[in-house]
Image: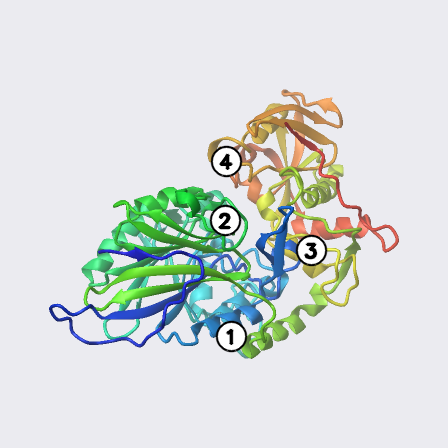
Amino acid sequence: MKRLLLATTAVALAAGMLAAQPATAGRPHDLADLQILAINDFHGNLEPPAGSSGRVVTGKDAAGKDITVDAGGVEYLATHLKNARVGNPNTTTVGAGDLVGASPLLSAAFHDEPTVDALGDLGLEATAVGNHEFDEGAAELLRLQNGGCHAVDGCADPAAPFQGAAFQYLAANVIDTKAKKTVLPPYWVKDFGNGAKVGFIGMTLRGTPDIVTKSGVAGLSFTDEVVTANHYVSELRLKGVMAIVVLLHEGGLPASNVYNYDCNAGGNLGLSGPIVDISKKLSPSVDLVVTGHTHSSYACSIPDPMGRPRMVTSAGSFGREYTDVRLKFDLDKNDIVQVAAQNKVVTRDVEKDAKAKALVDKYKVLVAPIANRNLGYIAGDIKRAGTSTVESPLGDLIADAQLASTSAPDKGGAQIALMNPGGIRTDLVFAQSGAEGAGVVTYGEAFAVQPFNNFVDTVSLTGAQVVTVLNQQFTGANAGTAKKVLQVSAGFTYTVTGLSTVSDVRLNGVPLDPAATYRVTINSFLADGGDGFPELAKGTDKLVGQLDIDSFADYLAAHSTPSIPYPVPAANRITFQ
């Protein structure tokens, strides 16, 4: 198979109806124009995301600062996708995982049923599972696929029980260890008509058990992405499906945060991360790799094992972008021979889709009594990122809140609190999101920051174990990255040298005693050893506290008033040198 890969800048391919003429000697092959629209990491963001989570970087100004545009919201996404399909009759819409999970309250309060319905309404046909699809376990994922009322909370509307997804979840590398088969179909074949068929293999990252609670992946095993994909490539080809797309919830990090950055400029690949090595090993029969997980934007050419260029894409996160892929399908060879891809911004300057708006409005009314409750007041934007280090103002606030809820002797006697950055999903924004007023934090806004409903656990660790935990930020599963730096509570300080060596660990100015025992508060995900911190799972004398969102809400209520709002933390507890 010869595959032509076009540049990822603006490329217009004329859309055409499928031809059905037989090939003859000396006559050019019949080509059909196909379109694939792809999204990833939607995370239940039905409403337009707030703050930096609701903006896309479109360029740099003369000083090198980001130029951004507001983006996202399912009402706008539905319109953009509908517009993108105009003139493209041979089209499908697919996803690369984490379309639900870690969702804002509007979706999470109803176990993501609103998002599943909305995605079906906007034309999604198939998606890979991601790690967050397993937040509530395989049984709940199967309920989202097949329908039915929630096992505990029942039906949101008993008169109209949830019908399940109108699209197909794919889980080629997720095995039910008891049944010894995949929990969901490994692939889906789209028949565009007249013999043009494309197979889609869906997978999550092999490391899913490391970043999901143990209960979420109980009874499941996750197989290698390359081995799995190549196995199903062979199976599809045996069935006569030669055109193959991999939907994979694993990704990379581009060298630029501009959404349409040319990552192949100058002949060098401006992309790093696990997806690069995976892509280089996937069977040459794979024509396109649609990815996610890192919440990054890219459309890059990465050579396949035969050295031929192959397109690898990702469309950011939270519904702020989608990828428009155009393909030429050779009806004589029964295969894809040309691929072009471009990320598009979901701007908010288009008309809202009526059906999506009706769905959002319906659930806003249902959730309003909870979401609009005022919790506290802030003096400015409190961000989860954006400081000069990987310590964040919002991370410090959350750690302080969890320490406050567990420091009393009967609540755990905590002395230190640690918070994983991956559990902080968005900023606390000073500007009002509704009618609450500027600087007011509502329950809905707080829930968007911490949507996992983890419990706050307090365990006993020796000083030596605490230091081991800090070192695990840069070793083992977290080696070579600074993405898992734990956020720390007030009074706990240490120094990091070269993003590898931890030293001068102190509590309230006193060096940590390796032999002494300390009470440490962590969420239940970390208490299971999640995010590559196995030492935390060795904690003893565990006391399970309240939900993390409740700790957060109580702390804001107790430490802020309209006249004295909560100040923006300085994020100066960890020294980097």
Cα distance, mark 1 to mark 3?
Answer: 29 Å
Label 2 sits on residue: 294
Look at the numbered discs 1 and 2 and tell me whether their residues touch, using CB distance below 8 Å: no
Cα distance, mark 4 to mark 3?
Answer: 28 Å
Label 4 sits on residue: 478
Q: Earlier in the sequence, mark 1 or mark 3?
A: 1
Q: Quadrant of the C terminus?
A: top right
* Crowd tier of the residue under label 1, counting other residues whose Cα lies within 10 Å: few below 14, some 14–19, many 20 or above: some
Three-letter amino acid code of the residue under disc 3: Ala
Quarter of image, res 518: top right
**Secondary structure beneath disc 3?**
helix
Three-letter amino acid code of the residue under disc 2: Thr
In depth, the one of 27 and 502 nearer the eye is 27
Q: Earlier in the sequence, mark 1 or mark 4?
A: 1
Q: Earlier in the sequence, mark 3 or mark 2?
A: 2
Q: Which mark is residue 161?
A: 1
Cα distance, mark 4 to mark 2?
Answer: 15 Å
Cα distance, mark 1 to mark 2?
Answer: 34 Å
Q: Earlier in the sequence, mark 4 or mark 2?
A: 2
Q: Position of residue 250 (x, y in %)?
A: 43, 49
Label 3 sits on residue: 446
Look at the numbered discs 4 and 3 and tell me whether their residues touch, using CB distance below 8 Å: no
Residue at the limit of the structure toward the front, as seen here: 62
Q: Quadrant of the N terminus?
A: bottom left
Residue plotted at (51% across, 37% down): 532
In depth, the one of 211 and 574 nearer the eye is 574
Residue plotted at (39% across, 56% down): 7
**Secondary structure beneath disc 4?**
helix
Q: Earlier in the sequence, mark 4 or mark 3?
A: 3
**In the image: residue 379, left or right of residue 573:** right
